[in-house]
Amino acid sequence: MANPITPVAEYALPGTDLVRRIPALLAALAVGLFGALSFAAPAAATTHAAPATATLSCENGKVAVRWSIRNGWPDVADVSDVSSKPAGVALGGTELDGKGDKIIGKQLVPTSTETATLNYTVRWADRATAAQTASKTIPGDVCSEPAPKCIEAADASYQHSFDGTKGTATVALLAGQKLCKGSSQDFSLASYTATSAGGGYASALPQQLFRQQTRTVSARHPSVTLRVAVPDCYTQVVLIWGDRDEVLTDFRKGTPSYGAKVLGHGGAPGNRSIGPLGSFHGGRTACVVSVTDSASPSASAAPAPVHSAPASSAAAAAGSASSLPVTGGSLAAVIVAVVVLAGGGLVLFVTARRRRVSPTDR
């Protein structure tokens, strides 16, 4: 009987099992890494931080910086080692109860401050520590009052133009300004006859008002234009602050002048309007004033200036002026004289007639 075949054990190469297990190991490693990343992602989204932010306002002439420290970690934390510049800060507490909880503090700094800073340290329950620094830039207009919607005429500023040779001027509110309803300001332009064209104010005296005009700047009329006639001789033209009652009728030695009322003057109120000095002296010829009789000198009309006449015209005028008009008293005297002369002539005629009669004629 034949011997049964005995199976021969399979020959295994060294490390064959390890090679077969590599894919399984790699798969397990991938699963573990994925799980680790999944659990670590929420933790990575939350960090040990407690940032501070600030808002600004004005309080009693100083800038109030209101700090807010907010916890960015789930655990409770303590805030310590607090310091601030340029002034101290008063915090409303020192403990943060959890994520999202905050501490409020206020810092008062001068209006000239450009930057406010806050330094502090936060310690969490898990013993993590973070030193924090925050800063806030402070604009220069935090404590400036907002511009009013309208202003009163007494607080307004103006700008003007002036041409004395033409007798024209304009006055307007500065850009961005508007007068309140019911508030207004009067301005006047006036021309005068003068005794000279320059050499100083005193050398041009006396002066007489020639023409004037007043216009009013208001909420409805933010700008006005003024025009006056200018005499064709020595003159002064002025643009002043005020209504027609402020216009002077004449200037003489010892009488007041406009002074700082002239727009463009260095003093108030003239300096409240930006523009050239509103005063002009000019002209090339002397003013001839015609005088009319009046029952009351004070009621006489303003003199009307004219050009000086040539010599020939002056002589003709003198000749015509020598023949005076016949008034009522002069006419009566002439009639009496005529009657007397006629009577005397009649007497002489009768006497002469009698002498010529001879005795023979009787």
Image (tube, helix red, strand yellow):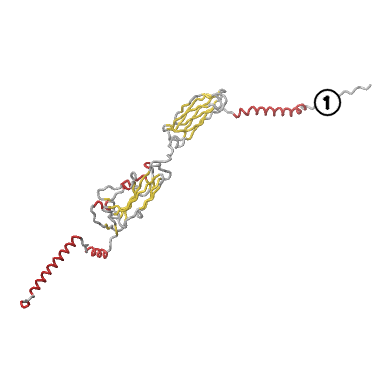
* Any part of residue 163 in sight: no
Q: Which picture quadrant has residue 22?
A: top right
Question: The C terminus is located in which quarter?
Answer: bottom left
Question: The N terminus is located in which quarter?
Answer: top right
* Residue in view at x 68 percent, y 27 percent: 32
How many labels, in total? 1
Q: Considering only vertical position in the picture, is 66 above or below 258?
A: above
Q: Considering only vertical position in the picture, is 150 above or below 277?
A: above
Farthest residue, direction left? 359
* Any part of residue 60 in sight: yes
Q: Considering only vertical position in the picture, is 209 above or below 18?
A: below
Q: Where is residue 36 shown, x and y percent of the image?
A: 66, 27
Q: Which picture quadrant has residue 290?
A: bottom left
Horizontally, residue 195 falls left or right of residue 8, namely: left
Q: Where is residue 40 shown, x and y percent of the image?
A: 63, 28
Tag 1 secondary structure: loop
Farthest residue, direction bottom? 360
Q: Which residue is mark 1?
A: 10
Q: Nearer the viewer, residue 326 or 24?
A: 326
Horizontally, residue 324 falls left or right of residue 262, namely: left
Q: Where is residue 171 shown, x and y percent of the image?
A: 38, 48
Horizontally, residue 97 falls left or right of residue 197, namely: right
* Residue in view at x 28 percent, y 60 percent: 308
Q: Nearer the viewer, residue 222 or 112?
A: 222
Farthest residue, direction front? 362
Q: Nearer the viewer, residue 232 or 34?
A: 232
Q: Amino acid at mark 1?
A: Glu
Q: Where is residue 330 shown, x and y percent of the image?
A: 18, 61
Q: Residues within 10 Å of mark 1 (few under 14, many from 20)?
A: few
